Amino acid sequence: MTPARTPGGRGGTVLASCKGGRDVRLAGIRAGRELRARLAAMGLVPGIRLRVMRQEGGGPLVVALRGMRLAIGRVMAEKMDVEPWSGS
């Protein structure tokens, strides 16, 4: 992953800066209640393991989780804090 500072002064990486083929853990979502609920309805909750399948140019990212693939827009991906996956 490319080191990036998340807005708000915390160190970390945002999903939008991850390279394809990486496994990451969703550490947090910096968004309002509606967007957090929308992401949760898609299974994107803190602690979930994601694999970045495609991250090209300025288009959406494609991530895999729990046997499905989702396209996530750049604006949403910039609000999602991730860290390297270290679980089993």
Image (cartoon, rainbow, N blue to C red):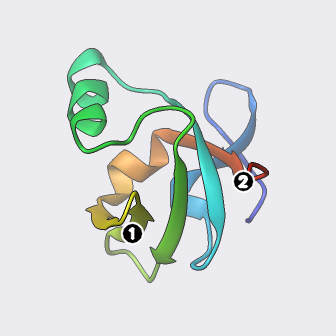
Q: Nearer the viewer, residue 60 or 37?
A: 37
Q: Residue at x 64, y 55 (%)?
A: 24
The quadrant of the picture occupied by the N terminus is bottom right
What is the three-letter code of the residue carrying label 1? Leu
Q: Nearer the viewer, residue 35 or 9?
A: 35
Does residue 6 sit above or below 15 in this rendering? above
Q: Which residue is mark 2?
A: 85
Does residue 27 sit above or below 64 in this rendering? above
**Could you tell me which secondary element the residue under label 2 belongs to?**
loop
Q: Residue at x 74, y 28 (%)?
A: 10
Which quadrant of the structure image shows residue 28? top right
Q: Residue at x 37, y 71 (%)?
A: 62
Q: Which mark is residue 35?
A: none
> Residue 71: percent from the left, percent from the top?
28, 66
4 on left or right of 61: right
Residue furthest front as drawn = 88
**Could you tell me which secondary element the residue under label 1 belongs to?**
strand
Mark closest to the chain's N terminus, 2 or 1: 1
> What's the distance in space between the residues labelled 2 and 1, CA to CA?
18 Å
Q: Which residue is mark 1?
A: 61
